[in-house]
Each structure stands twice: as C-alpha cells, then as structure tokens.
Image (tube, rainbow, N blue to C red):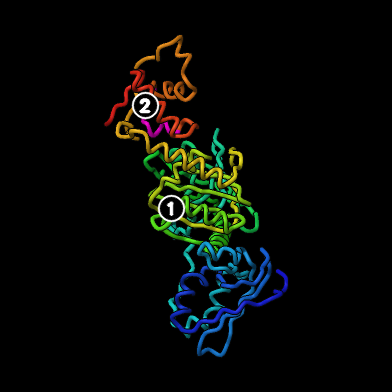
Amino acid sequence: MGSPARVFQLEFASAEEFQQEHSANLVNGGVFIATTESATPREIVSVELSLAGEPRKIRLDGEIVHIVPPEMAEAGALPGVAIQFACTQTALRAALEPFVQAAGAPRQEPPDAGRRKAPRVPAQVPIRIKAPGISLSGRTRDISLCGVLVSVPGDAMPVGTRVQLMIDHPSNGESFGVDATVTRQVASKGGVVAIAIEFDPTPERQDDLHAFIADVQSAEHSRRLGGMHGSLTEIGPQNLLQMLGKTAPHGTLTLSRENEEAVIGFEGQMLCYVQLGAISGMKALARVLGWEEGHFEFHARLDPMMSEDAPMLLDAALLEATRNLDELGTLDLSVLSPDATVRFQSVPAGPGGAGNSKVEDAVLDLARGEFTIRRILDMIPEPDLEILRALTFLADLGSIEIVTR
C-alpha cells in the first residue's frame, strides 16, 4: 500500500458516540466518512480519529472501497466514502485500545477458529458451486467462518451433497476454493430459494480460509456502510426504482420478503438484470413490483451477475411490468390459488390441439404432471399474466381441472 495522499478526520464528541461507532463499524475493520469531496475507488487514504477529552489521536491507513456521490442525497443517502482499514484485526484492536479504555467500550474478542459455529455476517459476493454433473453460479446472502447461505437460481441441491465452492473476494478479485457440504435448504412459497453450505477445509488450509473469510466480511461491512436500507411498506418497489434510477448512475437493489430475495441491477438508465429465485427479467420484475412489504438495501455500484436477459431501458421496463401487474388485477384469482393443483383432462378441440398457443401447450404438458399453479408459473418463462390467462381459458374449456386443496 502506498503513502496516503489525504487524511479524513473523524471526531467523537462523547464516549457514547465512540462506543456506538466502535461496536457497529470500527471493530469490524471499516468506517464510513460523510463527505462531499470527490474520491476515487481504491484510493489510499488515512483516517484520523479523535475523542473528546483525549489528547492523543489514532491514525489508521486504508483504501476507499465504496463511494456514495452527492447526487444520491436526493434519494435519501448520505454522501461519503466507505474505507476499509489495511491492518489486521489484531493490529486494529491494538490501535483502538486507548480509546476503548478511555470510553469504556466493550471489548470484542476475535472468533475462536476452533469452534464449529460462528456468527454470520450479511454479504453479497459471487460464488460458484460445482458437484458431479452440476455447475451453478450464485451469490451469498451471508457468510461466516463455518459456511455460507447462497441464493441459487433453479432447483437446489439436496442436503448432504458434497460440493466444491469458489468464493470471489468483492474488492480485490481474488478467489478461494474449498470443499463443502449442503446442510440445509431454505424454502418459500415458491419452493427452495437458498441453500446453506458448510465448509470442510483440510487442516492445513483452515487458517487460510478463515483469513480470507474475515477479509471478505470486512470488505462487505465497509461496502454496507455507504448503502441505503429501509422498509418497502414506506416506499413501494416501483417508486424506489424510479427514484434511484434518476439519482444514481448505477446501482444494485436487493429486495427481501420472508425467505424470498430479489436482486435488481441498473446502469445508465438501463435495467441490466432482475433475478428472483429461479425466474428473471420482466417476469421477475412484475412480481417484485407487487410486493407491498419487506425490506430493501441499495448500494451505488453494479454488482456482477450472469444474466441471459437483454438490458432494457429502466423506464420502459417499469412501464411494461406495471401494465402486466395492472392487468393481473382484472383476472378472477379466487379460483387460481397458487397452491391449487392443475390436472390434465383432455386435449382441446381441434386437430391435435393445433390452435393452442405456446403457453397453453406448456400448461397442458405440466398439467399431466399435476403441478401446482405456483410451480407452473415458475417453470414457464412467459409472464405470469399470460400463464394465468391460459389456465383460465383451458379450465373453461374443460381441458384442465384446477383442484384447490
């Protein structure tokens, strides 16, 4: 690391103020500095800490890992920079010790590497999962020294599956591979939406793994310092996306409701991707816009994510998804419960059902397997509106039977 070109000042007016920042941020290896000064990602800087009543100052070197530009203030964000400290956790605790003693802040001991269980830290980092005949890409929801919780599109792997993980560091691009085991499936109304995976490193690689994970946690903590968080009850997904799209040049919006998690990325007024479990694109966007409760987290950077959907103008995508959502409200959904089972009865009139639409043919094929409406909606890539219309049409013809449990 080169010599810092500038120094940011962080003053604590009271012991209580330091205690709060220490336990929430400093001890985790990063800090957010509110400022409207221009900054550059990866810029080497110093942070000088001062505490009321303490003559000495503490200076820590680090690098800028996240920037919230001034224009984001219109969207409710605090402009500034997130800084990740360059020293180790042990050195950081030693440097902060004078202020810890002066302020009476509780000491936080480093985690015991020998324990099987460790605190999980929210983290959204790319991860690749490989097993015999399986190769998946996803991203973590949280991460600990023992394992990860991963959102993976498509059918999840069963508990007990042995896998190899490749975890990508969110800041420096390094990757770390480790053997692991699927230990739990997280389900929602639409099926399995995430899997918990426990690390199983060889003894000689355990320390390297713990050091890598600790660094990932620190980098993610610094990134989250400059983010926005809130409730979807207070501001709906559509208003949120419109506001952020106009005020941020790029960003990643994560929406969560119960066990479901959606990720939306945009850049330069373009919608780059939308991922909700196994579905993506406009289909996923229309569903998310219908959420009336849950939470959101926004960061003014575009997280990398594999997507087969072509980018769309953000305003046009929102208009189309809203239209689908409005038309969905005109359907009689009382007989289309997501948990209802669809059973095949007969082929519609006509030579081999030749007059059927592509969506109707797909519904008839899945009806032979007696899937639920929710499962059919997830398996057919067309918009939910078209699928529900096909279900209603085929039920009226008597070609399918909708059985409510």
Where residue 360 sits: x, y (%)?
44, 23
At x 52%, y 68%, the residue is: 28
- For residue 205, what is the image quadrant? bottom right
Mark drawn on residue 324: none
Where residue 333 sits: x, y (%)?
33, 34
Q: Which residue is mark 1?
A: 236
Q: Is residue 56 above or below residue 133?
A: below
At x 58%, y 47%, the residue is: 166
Does residue 206 appear to the left or right of 334 in the view shown?
right
Q: Main secondary structure of the magenta part?
A: helix
Q: Which residue is mark 2?
A: 392
Q: Is residue 181 above or below residue 119?
A: above
Q: How many marks?
A: 2
How crowded pointer 1 is (Cα within 10 Å; few <14, some 14-19, many 20+) is rated as some
Label 1: which secondary element = loop
Which stretch appears magenta? 369-378
Residue closer to the observer: 224 or 144: 224
Q: Is residue 112 visible?
A: yes
Label 2 is placed on what type of residue?
Thr
- Report how far apart the C-alphas of labels 2 and 1 lie in the structure: 29 Å
Residue closer to the observer: 325 or 346: 325
Does 125 lie within the magenta span?
no
- The quadrant the N terminus occupies is bottom right
Where residue 187 sits: x, y (%)?
39, 43
Label 1 is placed on what type of residue?
Gly
Q: Is residue 75 above or below residue 190?
A: below
At x 46%, y 21%, the residue is: 361
Q: Is residue 114 above or below residue 359?
A: below
